């Protein structure tokens, strides 16, 4: 067993270029054998892929707070019961509700042309029938902020900033600022609406929706994203002279709509009060069927958990699968869970969320105590043959578990290849056919492996560097 | 010069695998030198690319018979005059007009989901508010034709046939049959509407519009195309049980709307009554900006003609550039031209139309008299260094000149690489950014070369095998 670990570690060394064997904690031979068998099974996964296929086919779009999200909860409860999970339940909460009714954008001068556009989540309405005004272009939110009100007042602002492609989605953080802030800044300067070049990385006439910042929506006017070819068209027209556009956004809002987290468990044996949490979010934006964002994540964690549930003996700790509600519109599910389970967070030994599509996992970050890094190495060594590179100890976890590290809960981030993720993210194109089954199953294998090890080993991932226990 | 031709022909031999040198007709050294200079200039083309950029930016979509098509004619007349062409004019005609007002398709059972769909050109209206009915799927038009009316009556028919990708667009002919015939056959069997999987080759939520057959529209009900992911979704849902859809199509029609062909010329010298016609169509479908279909074709022929117009001496024959109107809805421009110029068709020594996007030209077909094949070889040898393979003598010319060969007019078909053409064809995605400037300029070079040779050489491309003249 020690020899086996050394061998795997040698692979890890080759991939990552630094030593590890001396740091890995020993894993009982039986645990490792079961883990390897789980990986083999996961690479043939049917359950996880079928889960996302059925969810996105039978329910389709699942806007936070909508009747469709409620249907998805009912569907998931039935499905998880059918799969044999324990304690399947919904933990409900309410959210403020927003949905689009109309979001038409068109060029009205120098010629009449439709614009492929979508209202941003949380956008205010225009007057009925829309507003028509001259377009003024900025290349970033910063240049809009720096502009005098006289340049903007009475006009439609257009922020024409591009997003770069990257493996880890690094361009998103910068690009999303204009989505969050444009309408508020524009409104403060007297603009009648804001258009942004979509936060995305493709060149089809596919606008990307997405939420405005919560504080950005307060006191902000109408806002919509236009597709990349339409942004190009607007820019080309503005090079030629003045351009007028009409923006007509009508919405349905409500102070309170029902949402909820769907929870299912595999009860542990002698450490059943200790919880390994793996998660995803069940809601989606309304344009696509939420296959990559985040049906895939749900399929991955359900598929992985089902493989562990089918073992002859359950692992020592309880595995809790959480399908969060209302992630897209403000992490409501994650916050509700953290609040409802505040007293129980000490018993959460590990948490992870899959919410970055279905691309191959290429690196594995941990957020462990310094004294627990040997466990990180052990897990990373097990994952190396799946093409997963060891990574640093700076994992933040996913969006819905982002409040858990602050409460002391260790997290991991299995980093997916997100090079194409923002080609589909928040567009009508986020559909089941975009999931690559081979990559998806590699994700199931990674989740099955680390989840089982975390549940069976009894390891304390919080362990401080000077902690002598174990 | 003879040596040069032998050298070029040797390249042709290598590419095409058959001899040609003995067949090529000699080209005067001066003509060949000018042709080579035109090719060099064309590979740096600015005029042609700018023409399609301006047309698709400043006018945008140009539906046949619409005010936008009229604007495009005015724009083109001004632009062609500005470029210095002679006899710039519009030859008007009227067409029956159809445009979409509403084309909403949705799944209503087992869950409510939007469907990315577009009405087919010529579609009938549904009752106001739409029709809702059960969906019945067929894998081809043939299986629908073979089905008993009892299987179809009262339902929405769905023809779920895929189109294959190919260099020459070979899959289109087969795939388009369902677009032309579905509504009529479905209506005859009592169906309330017809949906088809889009005639296209991409997997985005981009439906492809296009005309129904003229005789298919008579007595036919409402018809729409759905995107490939939506067709997948409908098929997956039907595997699970009954599916209901709602189809709401409202249109605007008129018995007569103005359209027209825009014509510009380069007057020839001693053979100015003989005409070399190069063409494209100015109208487009309404969803995209008609960049590939067929703004590119117009840019290619205008760019090529402008290079010839800028020569110190005009060629011997007149070059006529025709930007046809209302191609998409039934070749109205082509038919009007053939009728209006019936008495002059004997003087048309060659015709070509660019209407297959902006992909690289990879082969060159002719439709010459048997006695004129040596001229084909000469032109093909000149084009070989541009990566163009000699091809057969079975050219049909493009759609708007398809009536000319029957009237004895020789044609050529410079065959473009159409592998990706049907990814964009008739979709919102047919926009300027999809044009590759390098490939576009190779097209300009090919058109400039054969157009100049045809105009300057005085050759008779009609020549019969036993014709001794020249």
Image (cartoon, coloured by chain):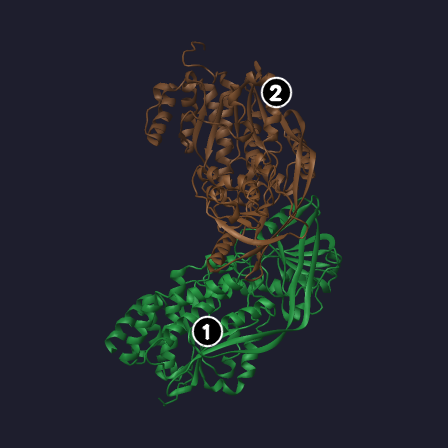
Chain colours: A brown, B green
Q: Is residue B18 visible?
A: no
Indicate the position of residue B238 as horizontal and vertical percent values: 66, 48
Residue B17 figure quarter? bottom left
User: From this viewpoint, which residue is outermost toward the bottom?
Assistant: B469
> Which element is circle 2 on?
loop
Indicate the position of residue A152 as horizontal and vertical percent values: 53, 48
Residue A10 figure quarter? top left
Q: Circle 2 marks a residue in which chain? A: A
Residue drawn at (38%, 61%) of the image: B438
The image quadrant where one finds the N terminus of chain B is bottom left
Q: Is residue A446 left or right of residue A59?
A: left
User: From this viewpoint, which residue is outermost toward the left?
Assistant: B3
Q: Is residue B454 left or right of residue B340?
A: left
The image quadrant where one finds the C terminus of chain B is bottom left
Dot 2, crowdedness within 10 Å: few (<14), some or many (≥20)? few
> Which label sits in the foreground, 2 or 1?
1
> Which element is circle 1 on?
helix
Q: How many marks?
A: 2
Q: Could you say which is closer to the camera, residue A161 or residue A36?
A: A161
Q: Which mark is residue B80?
A: 1
Q: Circle 1 marks a residue in which chain? A: B
Indicate the position of residue B133 as horizontal and vertical percent values: 74, 53
Indicate the position of residue B304 as horizontal and vertical percent values: 40, 71
Q: Could you say which is closer to the camera, residue B90 or residue A333?
A: B90
Provide the residue designation for mark 2: A341
Q: Is residue A90 left or right of residue A229?
A: right
- Residues flagged by tags 2 and 1 on a common chain: no
Q: Is residue B408 visible?
A: yes
């Amino acid at each position: 067993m020690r020899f086996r670990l050394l061998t795997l570690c040698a692979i890890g060394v080759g991939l990552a270029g630094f030593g590890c064997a001396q740091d890995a904690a020993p894993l009982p031979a039986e645990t490792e054998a079961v883990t390897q068998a789980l990986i083999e099974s996961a690479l043939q996964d049917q359950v996880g892929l079928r889960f996302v296929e059925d969810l996105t086919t039978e329910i389709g779009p699942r806007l936070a707070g909508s009747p469709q999200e409620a249907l998805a909860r009912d569907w998931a409860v039935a499905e998880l019961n059918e799969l044999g999970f324990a304690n399947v339940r919904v933990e409900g909460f309410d959210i403020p509700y927003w949905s689009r009714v109309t979001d038409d954008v068109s060029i009205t001068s120098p010629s009449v042309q439709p614009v492929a556009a979508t209202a941003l989540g949380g956008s205010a309405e225009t007057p009925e029938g829309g507003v028509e005004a001259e377009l003024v272009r900025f290349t970033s939110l910063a240049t809009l902020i720096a502009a005098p009100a006289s340049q903007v007042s009475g006009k439609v602002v257009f922020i024409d900033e591009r997003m770069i492609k990257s493996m880890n989605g690094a361009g998103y953080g910068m690009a999303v600022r204009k989505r969050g802030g444009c309408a508020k800044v524009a409104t403060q300067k007297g603009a009648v609406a804001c258009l942004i070049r979509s936060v995305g990385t493709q060149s089809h006439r596919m606008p990307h929706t997405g939420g405005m910042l919560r504080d950005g929506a307060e006191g902000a006017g109408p806002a919509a994203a236009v597709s990349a070819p339409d942004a190009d068209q607007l820019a080309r027209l503005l090079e030629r002279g003045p351009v007028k556009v009409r923006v007509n956004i009508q919405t349905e809002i409500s102070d309170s709509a029902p949402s909820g987290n769907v929870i299912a468990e595999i009860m542990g044996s002698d450490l059943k009060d200790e919880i390994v949490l793996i998660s995803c979010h069940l809601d989606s934006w309304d344009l696509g069927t939420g296959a990559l964002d985040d049906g895939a994540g749900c399929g991955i964690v359900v598929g992985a958990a089902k493989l562990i549930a089918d073992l002859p003996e359950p692992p020592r700790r309880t595995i809790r699968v959480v399908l969060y509600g209302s992630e897209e519109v403000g992490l409501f599910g994650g916050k509700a869970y953290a609040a409802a389970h505040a007293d129980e967070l000490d018993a959460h030994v590990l948490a992870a969320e899959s919410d970055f599509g279905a691309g191959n996992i290429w690196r594995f970050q941990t957020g462990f105590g310094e004294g627990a890094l040997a466990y990180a190495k052990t897990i990373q060594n097990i994952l190396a043959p799946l093409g997963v590179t060891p990574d640093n100890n700076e994992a933040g976890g996913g969006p819905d578990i982002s409040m858990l590290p602050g409460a002391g809960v260790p997290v991991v981030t299995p980093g997916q290849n997100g090079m194409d993720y923002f080609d589909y993210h928040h567009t009508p194109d986020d559909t089941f056919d975009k999931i690559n089954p081979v990559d998806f199953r590699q994700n199931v294998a990674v989740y099955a492996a680390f989840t089982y090890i975390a549940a069976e080993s009894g390891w304390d991932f919080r362990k401080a560097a000077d902690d002598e226990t174990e």
